[in-house]
Amino acid sequence: MALSQGPKKNYRCDRSLQQFYTGGPFAVGSGAPGGEGEGDAEAEAFLACACGSELRVVSAADTSAIGEPIDGDSEAVTALALSPDSRLLFAAGHSRLIRAWDLATRTCIRSWKGHDGPVMAMACHASGGLLATAGADKKVCVWDVDGGFCTHFFRGHTGVVTTIMFHKDPKRLLLFSGSDDGDVRVWSLESKKCIAVLKAHLSTVTSLALSEDGQTLLSAGRDKVVTVWDLRKYSSKKTITAYEMIEGVSFIGPGSGFLACLGVEPANLKEKANGYCLTVGERGVVRIWCLESAVCVFEQKSSDVTINSENEESRRGFTATVMLPDDRGLLCVTADQEFLFYSCTRTDEGTFQLNLYKRLIGYNDEILDLKFVGEEEQYLAVATNLEQVRVYDVASMSCSYVLAGHTEIVVCLDTCVSASGKTLVVTGSKDNTVKLWDMEKRSCIGTGKGHLGAIGCVAFSKKLKNFFVSGSSDRTIKVWTWDDALIDANGEVPLKAKAGVAAHDKDINSLSVSPDDGLVCSGSEDRMACIWKLPNLVSSVVLKGHKRGIWSVEFSPVERCVITSSGDRTIKIWHVPDGSCLKTFEGHTSSVLRASFLSRGTQFVSCGSDGLVKLWTIKTNECIATYDKHDGKVWALAVGRKTEMLATGGTDSDLNLWHDCTLEDKQEDFLKKASAEEEVLRGQELENAVSDSDYTKAIQLAFELRRPRRLLELFSQLCRKADPEDPIEKALHGLPKEGLRVLLEYIREWNTKPKFCHVAQFVLFRVLRSFPPTDIVEIKGISELLEGLIPYSQRHFSRVDRLVRSTFLLDYTLTRMSVVDPDVVDAGTTRDVTNDSSVENGEILPEEPAQESPEKPGKKIKSSKKGSNKKGKASSSNVVSVDPDVVDAGTTRDVTNESSVENGEILPEEPAQESPEKLGKKRKIKQIKQER
């Protein structure tokens, strides 16, 4: 990564090492979680681990998180299992609730309770349809995965059931369980009974393993023996004495590369009807055994497990082992949450060799200090609440190796590249010693003793690089030197202190050596920073001004200045010659724990107890950026001398790497401005196309600019136009498959609203007519799009159908009211009955005068008193115009009752002569009523 010139504007966290395993159950899966990578032979394995009350899925390659953490119970997870296709993850905790999680969607698809105590172990059947659970209530249960109900319930163990396993052959419905009563029981799922009790162990059964042919069972326990069982007779064939408590046992299959490296021919293995197995346990070594002779054929010479002295009896060695699929090697899990990956080779001498090729750290505890290692800064040394220093590969974030030698927690460290080109690391511990390490040998080359308290800080020489200084809780500073002969020598030699001084009244927290190796600055809990002349540690200047203890000090790389950070929430820059305070920076809300210079002394970065990392510009006294990626105190801060990359760590156990993204941000801003200008030009081109009625081009531009609202307006305009060229189909043929998918997403959204549904159906019809079904089926996510389109389309068509049916009732009503009379109204002429006028070809014709009857000229028609009293006063809207040609003299037609009145008497109604059109409509109405 190139170093950007000028001041830094921004940093970005590009890599992060987070805790993913705090001990307990775990599961190994192959392919992508959720089954997306199924069928890919080269798919990377992944780990599903219990992390407190959460479940985390990480890549086995670089521990990068796969998806979001799964929130489990509020209590710790006690059992885990993966389905054979790695789609489902089963988990249970102290709450006794068993949950099934879909790893693709991170949703709980099923949960149930089944035990009276915590679930201690789980196993999934090869078919994926059954799940077996073992509980602290001494019970074994088998569950139907799809239904969530119990299919088998077994009792018989007299202790906590610790391990459980199905038979590998799906046709043989057998279940094996081991308990802390020392028994191994074989259960038949067909007869629902215990068919065998295998008694051989005197302590807890910790692991079970089954051979490839399903005829041999291995059981290991804390009684330091491995028992070989013949499943045909359910009898013990052999007992292997391991002389250590065994935590894991695995069969080595006939096609495994381990057998090839051991020099065992597969043909010979079949003849023996026995094989080889490997065991791991409290000693932290891997051993391979021949089952026929019960002899150990391989044992690691030294353990790769780092042992914690705190509660050493229970925190040492391996806790589990798994043979990885596809002959990818061996995975061993340690008691201090490390995943060790081994591969085997055969040396030129013909001996078997086991190589550790990857170490993943599941939990770092608190990160106390860290520094970049090497000339190229490709490694990162990290001090945590352990006696070892873990060295990480910056690229893969995997632990490359461990520096073990201290007997107490390592508190501080520093690194340098010596004049001879050797990469060195110095560490200080609570065991009151300092150690010098050679990174090429990965071993300690010198130990310094002399302090009476815990070492709180160390610092290398910056120029000559042939000495380092250390500060302790005994309030003294010591200078330690070495020569090149020490580096070249084999073994560990004692270091001698060249000078020492009682420097402060309280614990010393930080030390820094000046660039010219002439001065050293110390910061203490006594609220003072002191500058001492080297090599004799003569007091030069005392820096007073902080109101609380000083946590860190550092010399500027170019100026004779010192930066200090304090518990009073301030950062100060001091002038070295006279000890005056030049600048004070405030911004943190809690103690400032670290501060380091950047950009050749023109900027600095700080971190504190508030969990914030801040970037400052010294000239303007301005904090230009604040980053919040930690959940607790940020104890450690490292700045790369070459790349100026940042590394931070703290109480949340997270290790974050930050890189300078100033140039990237400038390029992004430039590209954004250019794209904004281009979008303005294309938007104007879109408006020009619309004004020119070039709808094909307008649709394409609106789609390219991702303007669904404008696209909807264009489609709405085309819905109301009858264009024989159909510009929509021309625009659709120019879309790629990804663009067609986006268009269908737009249609799905428009279709959900009744206001725009007609436009959505209009465009959808064009899409289905323009593309064959084979092309539409190949669109990514088409099933989800259709699931969103079909229900709303059915709803819209049902609504339209109801409206059409309602128009039939309107036609019937108007016909019965004589508003619509095809016999009276000529073709092309419509009579407006309200105004008694005619409309012909859109023009209103003048009303013609009514002609009187030739028989009774001048005689007015009178309605009867009955009609006028009862009906005439009711409503004037019911009166319809009377045709004098139809009504005779002395006869009045009551149009409300469709009857005639003559001389006060009601005459019987004459049947009306209906036209064929009316009869046809009546038949339709009758038919619709019958259908309803």
Image (cartoon, grey):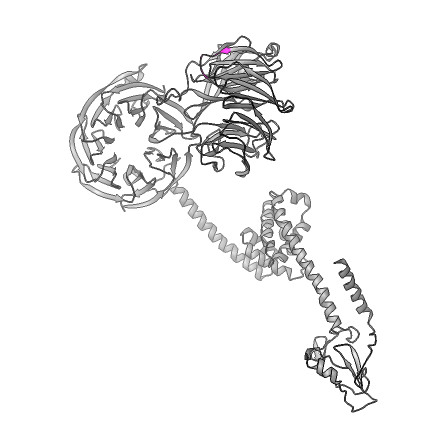
Please name the predominant secondary structure of the magenta segment in the image: loop
Q: Is residue 621 left or right of residue 201?
A: left
Q: Is residue 909 visible?
A: yes
Q: Nearer the viewer, residue 183 or 561?
A: 183
**Residue at horizontal 42 percent and vertical 35 percent from the top:** 15
Residue extending farthest top:
293
Q: Is residue 485 left or right of residue 930?
A: left
> Quarter of the image holding residue 423?
top left
Number of numbered callouts drawn:
0
912 relative to 336, above or below: below
381 relative to 565, above or below: above
Percent x, y of residue 83: 57, 30
> Quarter of the image holding residue 517?
top left
The answer to if 242 sits in the magenta stretch is yes
628 relative to 873, above or below: above
Percent x, y of residue 717: 61, 61
Which corner quadrant holds the N terminus? top left
The answer to if 370 sits in the magenta stretch is no
Percent x, y of residue 98: 53, 33
**Residue at horizontal 52 percent and vertical 30 percent from the top:** 115
Q: Is residue 559 visible?
A: no
Percent x, y of residue 280: 47, 18
Q: Nearer the viewer, residue 778 or 558?
A: 778
> Quarter of the image holding residue 84?
top right
Which corner quadrant holds the C terminus? bottom right
Which region is colored magenta?
Answer: 240-245
